[in-house]
Image (spheres, helix red, strand yellow):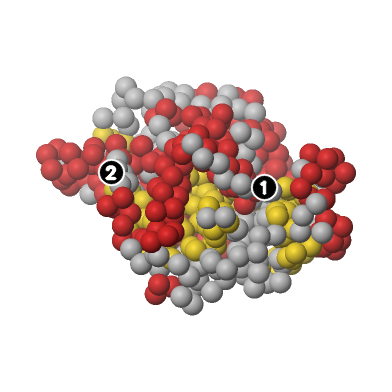
Amino acid sequence: MVSDESEHISYVGYDLMKFSTRELNLAAFAFVEHLRSSLLPCLRPHRLVKNTLEMARKKIREYDSKRLLKEHFKRLSGTELAIRSAQITESTDLKGLVEKETWLSSEKLVVKPDMLFGKRGKSGLVALNLDFTQVVAFVKERLGKEVEIGGCNGPITTFIVEPFVPHNEEFYLNIVSERLGCSISFSECGGIEIEENWDKVKTIFVPTGASFTSEVCAPLVATLPLEIKGVIEEFIKVIFALFSDLDFTFLEMNPFTLVDGKPYPLDMRGELDDTAAFKNFKKWGNIEFPLPFGRVMSPTENFIHNLDEKTSASLKFTVLNPMGRIWTMVAGGGASVIYADTVGDLGYASELGNYAEYSGAPNEEEVLQYARVVIDCATADPDGHKRALVIGGGIANFTDVAATFNGIIRALKEKESKLKAARVHIYVRRGGPNYQKGLAKMRSLGEEIGIPIEVYGPEATMTGICKQAIECISAAA
């Protein structure tokens, strides 16, 4: 069923949670090509899918990238990569670490931050050819200390330690998942000067579902010496198979080298499609998706994050501007992005207090706790100026609108005095199962607690209330 181009497409009879983003993208494009050619040419389906099925790319630490590579390379190729690495954080038992990884006390080592940022060598954050005592001193001097990288400030909390590998050759390999396949880039001139030598990088595109044969790989390795050409070609083919098998969305080795004639990654970055976690939890193991460098959760964000971890529903909350005067509480991942984008498109991004999304039919208690946090942030530090709270969403397929509104209504009643002190005006727009009852409850609530609440159903445009919220805060006090 296709309903309201600006809101959603519902695929009746399919459980979309059983597919990764890559699989959904492939199916979605087949579907929209059918729409374009025969059913609904007026819907501009390519734009629709672009807005709703973006790849869920989550960065992982270098330690985890190499762990996954080591664990699964042998399974896919029959040969083993001699990768060894250890992770050090504030809570690491260094004595226990050396007992577990005995090579730490017997070999020369490399140590560097493992914090999801690049150009560590150019930033003077990589130490080479150290013994373990020197590694510990290097880490202690920098652990928890704030640094500036690419305009972002943040503390270094995690380090990776590896054997020091003397080498003469440095190769570059990069694989990126795109909407219709993967781009694979390779260069014989890898390392910290890769950007200066970008003209030497060769790139090919492998469509989703196509076989990655020697013929397809040939342009990447065409200029390599014969004695290493076969080894590197086979390595690239296995890495591509591993990339697809583990649902990576991005993988980069810069550089990798050859040790005793076998490929060895020195520096590595990876991103995973976290929508594929349900089918890869055994393969991925205890994977961590850290926040971007410089991003630290506030107590309220951390509370919602922990709430999200304990439920099958989705509860997301990010503070953008604590002093903002437009706050959102939106049902649905796609809708939440559209509401935020609309406020920005209308020229009021600087007044947007947060990004918030709840979906997957959270129960009343979960919605209550979630709504309390949003309202507390939206009403903090009253300054006499009007504020707006947008309680929006598209047209739900399965979620009982009245049931989820019960939790929000309870929170609004609890926070009545805060809402009035902050001069909050509330704008509601929702559709879906039982929406009439839910909207009626919202209208009654406004009369009961004496707070301006404007309520709309699916007869109104989804983001029309964004304009009303802006007009509210722009009006003279």
**Label 2 vs label 1: CA separation?**
33 Å
> The C terminus lies in which quarter of the figure?
bottom right
Location of residue 466 with respect to 141 vertically, above or below: above
Q: Check disc 2: other Cα within 10 Å, few if <14, some if 14-19, many if 20+.
A: few
On the picture, is 249 further left or further right than 407?
Answer: left
Q: Tell which residue pokes out farthest to the bottom in this image.
A: 196
Q: Specify whether residue 237 is in view.
A: yes
- Quarter of the picture holding the N terminus: top left
Location of residue 232 with respect to 288 vertically, above or below: below
Q: Nearer the viewer, mark 2 or mark 1?
A: 1
Q: Secondary structure at mark 2?
A: loop
Q: Position of residue 55 (x, y in %)?
A: 43, 46
Q: Name which residue type carries label 1.
A: Arg
Residue 374 placement (x, y as % from top left): 64, 43
Residue 93, by quadrant, is top right
**Residue at the image point whose x is 42% and y is 27% from the top:** 18
What element does badge 1 sit on?
A: loop
Q: Is residue 314 visible?
A: no
Residue found farthest to the front: 227
Residue wearing tag 1: 84
